[in-house]
Image: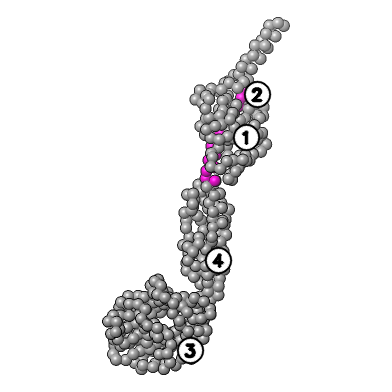
Amino acid sequence: MMNNLKKHIVFAIIMLLSVGCIDDANNSGNTPADDTTIEDNSSDDTIVGKRPELKELVIEGSTYNSITLARPEFVDEGDPDPIIFAYIGEEGEIDIAGATVSNYTEGTIDVSDSGYTFTGIDNGKNYRIIVTAENSYGYSVRQILCPIADQNALDEAYEYYLNINHADFLTGGDISINKVTNSLSFPTSGINGTTLIWESLDESVITDDGIITRYLNNAPATMTLRIKKGSLYSQPITYSFTVYRILFYESFDDDYSDWYYSTSIYDDYSFTISDQEFISNRSVRMTSNDDASYELTYTFPNKVNPEYIGFYMRVTELTTEMNYLWFLDSTYSNTQYQNVSGISLYYSTTFQQNVINLWGQGVVGNYSPNVWYHFEFKRINWIDYNFELYINGSYYGVYQFDNFRTSMNKIYMKVGEYTSVYFDEILIW
């Protein structure tokens, strides 16, 4: 009887000594490396239970002030069921020795049945989460570094682009957000090293790349922006704007042979352009090789009251004979053209140079043969017919064109002798 009692006492002492025995030579007094498992390495054929073995930890998500740990999973839960605790602390501060965690900011959280969201995370700091699973036969420890710098950078970028001046951001401040007239160039690199991802919700008006299509009426359009940092994405930000109407657009064909041709000085070359006919990369030429002056009239399909008129012109040779371009009321006759404002390009014997002349308002600039010039008239207000003049993007002043009126629906062009004029890309809105 006494011998049996002694055997039981010896067995119990062996059991107590075996529980929690850890070979931790490489991690003594220091935080282990990421996803390091620290576990009971002892073995005894007489032990009938089993220590737990944790899988790698998983972070479900994070915000600027929180980190969510998914419920820990096991390779083997062991026997009996372990108690599972989670801890979080700043990287470089939190520490573990055996299964004891110290210097944590929040801890001893029971995560046996669910994950947990740690809150109160400080902006810009990295954190480490440690999980211990322990039963009467041993323990397992897993940990994961949580670099929240990416999340903080993402959140800061999100707030920045959410509250930015949309017009300045989308158009560079050049135009109103409610009057977009040119394709937009969306940035793809954002602040804090973020990536900007754009998507159009109105592809018939604007593409993901910012290419716009203008219609006869104003068209609302919406772009969404998602911000990416590392593997994290922001919620979408919506930008709404208006692609402005287009009243008239046409490019012309290089081949002039299919047009009616006459040397009569008063014969117009007239045609009507369909409202929605859009043709690209073409130009029209008029040529005079003798003493005759040729005239050409383009008839608009609708009466317009323009805010903007733009077109390209190129003259192969300039003589003292003027090459006129006028925007006219349809009621004007040929004999009245000299009384309205327009543009003429010619060699001036007075200035001894090639000049750009606003008919009735004087010389505004110099001109070189065989060079494309882009003329733009931008209306200042609706009270009068004062337009800002731009030539090849340079400002030339304010000029009055009172014939740019509601009933205006013709372009009239006259070519001087011994010269050719190319005319292209007329745009009115």
Picture residue at 53% right of the left edge, 29% below the top = 31
Residue at disc 3, secondary structure:
loop
Q: Is residue 144 magenta?
A: yes
- Mark 1 surroundings within 10 Å by alpha-carbon count, few (fewer than 14), some (14 through 19), many (20 or more): some
Q: As shown in the figure, which amino acid type bears the numbered disc 1?
A: Glu
The residue where tag 3 is placed is: 330
Q: As shown in the figure, which amino acid type bears the numbered disc 2?
A: Ser
In the depicted structure, whether residue 34 falls above or below residue 43:
below
The residue where tag 2 is placed is: 136
Q: CA distance from mark 1 to mark 3?
A: 82 Å
Residue at disc 2, secondary structure:
loop
Viewport quadrant of the N terminus: top right
Which numbered disc flags the more N-terminal residue, 4 or 1? 1
Q: Nearer the viewer, mark 2 or mark 4?
A: 4
Quarter of the image where one finds residue 79: top right
The residue where tag 1 is placed is: 106
Picture disc at residue 241: 4
Q: CA distance from mark 4 to mark 1?
A: 47 Å
Picture residue at 28% right of the left edge, 85% below the top = 349
Picture residue at 60% right of the left edge, 42% below the top = 66
Quarter of the image where one finds residue 127: top right
